[in-house]
Amino acid sequence: MKIKFAWLLAASMFTAPVLAADSIKIGLSGPFTGGSSSMGVSMRDGVKLAVSEINAAGGVMGRPLEVVERDDEAKNELGVQIAQELINKENVVATVGYINTGVALASQRFYQEAEIPVFNNVATGSIVTKQFAGADFKANYIFRNAANDTIQSAMIAEEAVKRQNFKKPAILADASNYGQLGKTDLTNALSKLGVTPVATEKFNVGDTDMTAQLLRAKEAGADVILTYAIGPELAQIANGMAKLGWKVPMIGSWTLSMASFIDTAGPNGDGAMMPQTFIQQPTTPKRKAFIEAYQKAYNIDRIPSPVSAAQGYDSIYLLAAAINQAKSTEGRAIREALENLGTKVEGVVTTYDHPFTATDHEAISDNIPVFGLVKNGRVGPAHPEDLEGDKALRIKPKA
């Protein structure tokens, strides 16, 4: 018995490095604890679901994908540390993730320097894919398959001003990079429609009392609240309006769909509207299969952040297609394949048909997102006609 155990131990010590060498390591960085965790966990689980499906089908180039997961806690300094660890210690061939714009901007420079692709599948700050674009850089290693804030802010402004005819919006945004960059995009979008906010208010991440900001917005005559923030603080806005006995519509960025907003706001969150690349409804066969697989894998009914889960899932399939096309795990080859992807990738959000070029690293165009609406603890389409018939699957126009 001892001899058999010793032999097994020696065999495992011998074979473990071989198995590790055979796998293709993909970094996975996001906040799996804290206020942004409903986004991070949903994204992570979407990524892992795609990896399990790909590996079950034979992997990539006959090799299994291996996820190297790290919790950045939505902290810039921790994201920086993790990026260096994944690059220099874990030798990942690419990294997916980044929920928070600030973490992305602080961390992805290390991938750019190492010429390793980063796939932002949730962070939406407009600057994210432009950080290393332009004549000063030979190539850009930063990609994204989320609706950036330029797209979202224009949608929010048009919904509030054109579709619903509000004239006196107030903007409430948190103090993070995400909130402040989004506020600027939203102010610019309103300006293009000839509208100036009657109030622009800021609050800190973690604040639980929005009374002062809401009172100033109310006194300014605001007829709608436009938001750029994360779920828990957004819930405090909805709850704060209820405490004041003042109810105006709430329209904001996609984060209003987070479970941490919906659950914390409860009935006060009903009616909130936000751009969505994916709503948890089986409007296409691919979405139906994804929803059922996610629910089965994680024993859950409502996905905490459906957008994060779907975009995380799709990012892995896009990356796998690029590696297969490149027939290489070398960073430059993967980047070039992403920029010239020759095969269509059927995703949950959309079907990706040549989604990137050398000068366009945004997979999501402005025709893809639709508006979601919170009602009875779920997000459904605000305008059901937006997902009917041929409109259910929206595809980026070819360049």
Image: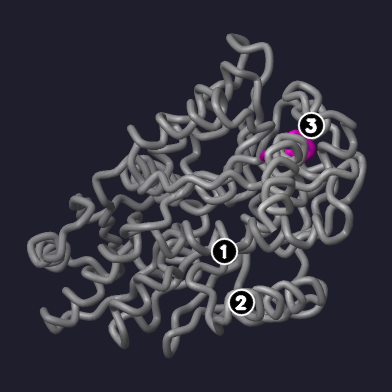
For residue 283, what is the image quadrant? bottom right
Q: Secondary structure at mark 3?
A: helix
Which numbered circle lies on residue 339?
3
- Report the span colored magenta: 21-25
- Amino acid at pointer 3: Glu
| Residue at x-position 61% and y-position 12% | 137
Q: Secondary structure at mark 2?
A: loop
Which numbered circle lies on residue 307?
1
Which numbered circle lies on residue 393?
none
User: Who is closer to the viewer here, 382 or 80?
Assistant: 80
User: Who is closer to the viewer here, 387 or 115?
Assistant: 115
Label 1, residues with CA under 10 Å away: few <14, some 14-19, many ≥20: many
Which numbered circle lies on residue 280?
2
Q: Is residue 150 visible?
A: no
Task: Say whether disc 3 or disc 2 marks the residue closer to the N-terminus.
Answer: 2
Q: Is 22 one of the magenta-colored residues?
A: yes
**Relative horizontal placement of residue 38, taking residue 387 as reference (left or right):** left
**Is there a contact, CB below 8 Å, between mark 2 and mark 1?**
no
Relative vertical location of residue 134 with respect to residue 43 in this rendering, above or below: above
- Amino acid at pointer 2: Gln
